[in-house]
Image (spheres, grey):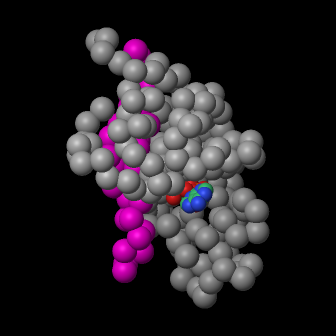
Amino acid sequence: MSGFGKDGRVTRLFLAVWPPPEIVERLAALPRTEQAGVRWVPPENLHLTLRFLGQADPEDVDASLGHLELPTAEVTLGPAVSRLGRSVVVIPATGLDELAAVVRDATAMIGQPLDPRPFAGHLTLARLKHRAACGVAGAPFRATFPVTSIALVESTQTGRGVEYTTLGRYVVGRVPGTP
Ligand code: 3AM
């Protein structure tokens, strides 16, 4: 774990998997038609959320995850761009359920209450306003990659949109402190 200030800042946080650069490149190459009511996620922000914490102290997260053995995971994205609910354009993701459950259990008392809905692995590509149509829905996309770490990410709303900063990473598949 690295990258935390010790100033006890309270921030909006979430835990996520960053896809590897070659997958981000392929995701960014999907058609991104600029049209009214469609807000595309910039390629550098593409991620798979494991848990949204909201306002929380990063040190509490570190205390909960820093000594935990996180299960390994292999993400499969696909088979195609689809919708999650009415307004989110996603690529479904499988392979993260066990990791998400461990993260969720370990951080249950931190940040906002747990979402009672079952975990639905996905990578958000765009958000739609007023049920806008989005040309990319249905486009085939398949990719598989191993998860090497999960990231604690700080989300900051700026004039240019949302900015994500990785505050720290937790390696999966080994007990912290062992080689
Ligand atoms: O990974 P996705 O796109 O599903 O929608 C936000 C994004 O999810 C979600 O957290 C992820 C990283 O920002 N998010 C933002 N605010 C939220 C909230 N208040 C939220 N999820 C639940 N409650």
**Percent coordinates x, y for residue 109 in the rendering:** 56, 37
Q: Quadrant of residue 94?
A: top right
80 or 123: which is nearer to us? Answer: 123
Q: Residue furthest top?
A: 178
Q: Quadrant of residue 151?
A: top left
Q: State the quadrant of the C terminus.
A: top left
Residue 62's place in the image compared with 26, above or below, is above
85 or 137: which is nearer to us? Answer: 85
Q: Is residue 173 magenta?
A: yes
**Residue drawn where x is 34% and y is 49% of the image:** 166
159 or 173: which is nearer to us? Answer: 159
**Residue drawn where x is 52% and y is 41% of the image:** 110
**Percent coordinates x, y for residue 126 in the rendering:** 58, 68
Left or right placement of residue 57 versus residue 78 in this view:
left
Work out whether residue 25 can be spotted: no
Residue 32's place in the image compared with 83, above or below, is below
Dominant SS of magenta comes to strand
145 or 83: which is nearer to us? Answer: 83
Residue 29's place in the image compared with 171, above or below, is below
**Residue drawn where x is 45% and y is 49% of the image:** 56
Q: Is residue 160 magenta?
A: yes
Q: Which residues lie in the magenta part?
A: 148-175
Q: State the quadrant of the N terminus.
A: top left
